[in-house]
Image (cartoon, helix red, strand yellow):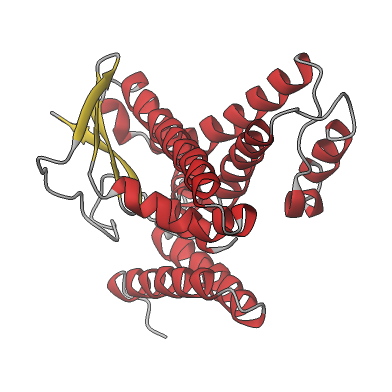
Amino acid sequence: MTKLFLFSMLNRRHNKEMLLAEPQSTPADFHFHIGRIPVRVTGWFWPAAGLFGWGLAQSLAGDDTRTLLIYLGVWVLVVFCSILVHELGHALAFAASGQSSRIVLYHFGGLAVPTGMPAPALKSPLRRLAVSAAGPVAQLCLAIVVVAIVMMLGYQVPDPGFLSSLPIIGNSLEEVSLAGQPIPSMLGRLMVYHLLFVNIAWAILNLLPVQPLDGGRIVLEGLKVFGVSAADQIASLFGLLIAGVVAVWAYQHQETYLMVLFGVLGVGCYQRLVSSGVRG
């Protein structure tokens, strides 16, 4: 399941630390608005989302091609909605600070890109912290809404799988998975499971204190809120250590995608340390 994480972890936003730049517009792009926020979905978003869900859909559908395509469609829809909610959280936080922005969904996840003149309010590290936290918080709120709706309808929340091993969250999900009647539709159970997996697991992973993930930005801006003069160096060093631990864990558990991801993030943290004058 780890390869599913990779799709949303490179969804950085608006500074020079972006691992991947916003892709250029193409005729295959799909455009719409959410209120005043423009949204662009690139043509490569859909096959990339499908690629990362292919293995799971195939394991569930077996040799039934029609069922495989249906399950894959459910996965892609969930990924689309979840990443859109994540970036919408950032965009709304920008708007609350007086900053306009646009959302781009592309083959490596999503971007909430500031537009126009920089808002004076974003000079405050506390405001920037709020913007960074808004994406994962939006996803966790979506997961809570999904659980609430399922329970209100009198159904069981699908078995949370590996999420049951998480403290607090796992116990809560395990309790609600035993209440009510099973969701009668396999597609319904699958959609709820995917929604919980993506919006809890990806949000938690994104909150790890490794730049340029949201958690790394939160640590950096939090240090600045408290006036720590070496905030950049401390955040980068902390991120380097965490990235190393996760990469080693992933290697030991043969989680190749996670290992590569945090290896790359660790290199980025080291480069920031070097550029800030800290030599190893």
Where does residue 258 sit, x and y in percent of width and height?
52, 68
Q: Is residue 21 above or below residue 129?
A: below
Q: Is residue 250 above or below residue 33?
A: below
In the image, taking residue 235 as reference, residue 103 lies left or right, namely left
For image coordinates 34% across by 44% down, the residue present is 110
In the image, taking residue 180 as reference, residue 112 lies left or right, namely left
Residue 212, located in which quarter of the rendered image? bottom left
Where does residue 77 sit, x and y in percent of width and height?
45, 36
Please give the count of numbered marks on the rendered protein: 0
Where does residue 241 sit, x and y in percent of width and height?
55, 72
For image coordinates 43% across by 49% down, the residue present is 217
Q: What is the quadrant of the N terminus in the image?
A: bottom right
For image coordinates 83% across by 35% down, the residue present is 177
For image coordinates 42% across by 65% down, the residue present is 233
In the rendered image, is residue 12 in sight? no
In the rendered image, is residue 102 in sight? yes
Q: Is residue 159 above or below residue 234?
A: above
Q: Is residue 259 above or below residue 98?
A: below
